[in-house]
Amino acid sequence: MTTDYGRVNAPDFPADADWLNTDRPLRLADFAGKLLLLDFWTYCCINCMHLLPTLRRLESEFPEELAVVECTLQSSTGSAPRRTYARP
């Protein structure tokens, strides 16, 4: 017996997003065929910081199967927070 849960298309990353550790803005299509793990974290969360090396290790162990994109909110003094995406 097989179960078909259907297919849902995720929205792409915002066109005006800030990117770190990559030479260009990325799109979901760049990760076709891979499991994409979005890690939402913040600088003030010590548990989040401890998880980052593990995520990097997993991505390096499974480069054909897994991609990790780290997502955070950053703000400069006096400015509104902006979504920032980073490749490990």
Image (spheres, rainbow, N blue to C red):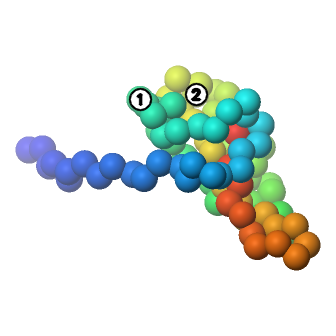
Q: Position of residue 5 (x, y in %)?
A: 20, 53
**Direction from residue 44 to residue 51 in the image, left or right:** left
**Most foreground residue, 63 or 42:** 42
Return the residue found at the far right: 77
Q: The N terminus lies in which quarter of the figure? A: top left
Residue 46 in sight here:
no
Q: What separation in Å lies between label 1 and label 2 (alpha carbons)? A: 13 Å
Q: Is 21 above or below relative to 18? A: above
On the image, the x and y values in percent for residue 35 come to: 47, 38
Kind of residue sitting beneath label 2: Phe
- Contact (CB < 8 A) between labels 1 and 2? no
Q: Total number of numbered labels?
A: 2
Residue at 33% x, 49% y: name it: 9
Q: Quadrant of residue 29?
A: top left
The answer to which of marks 1 and 2 sits earlier in the sequence is: 1
Q: Which residue is the site of mark 2?
A: 62
Say whether residue 4 is left or right of residue 26.
left
Q: Position of residue 57 (x, y in %)?
A: 71, 35
- In the image, residue 36 sits, relative to residue 32, either above or below, namely below
**What number is the disc on residue 56?**
none
Residue at the bottom extreme, as displayed: 78
Q: Is residue 32 above or below residue 83?
A: above
Reading the image, the residue beneath label 1 is: 33
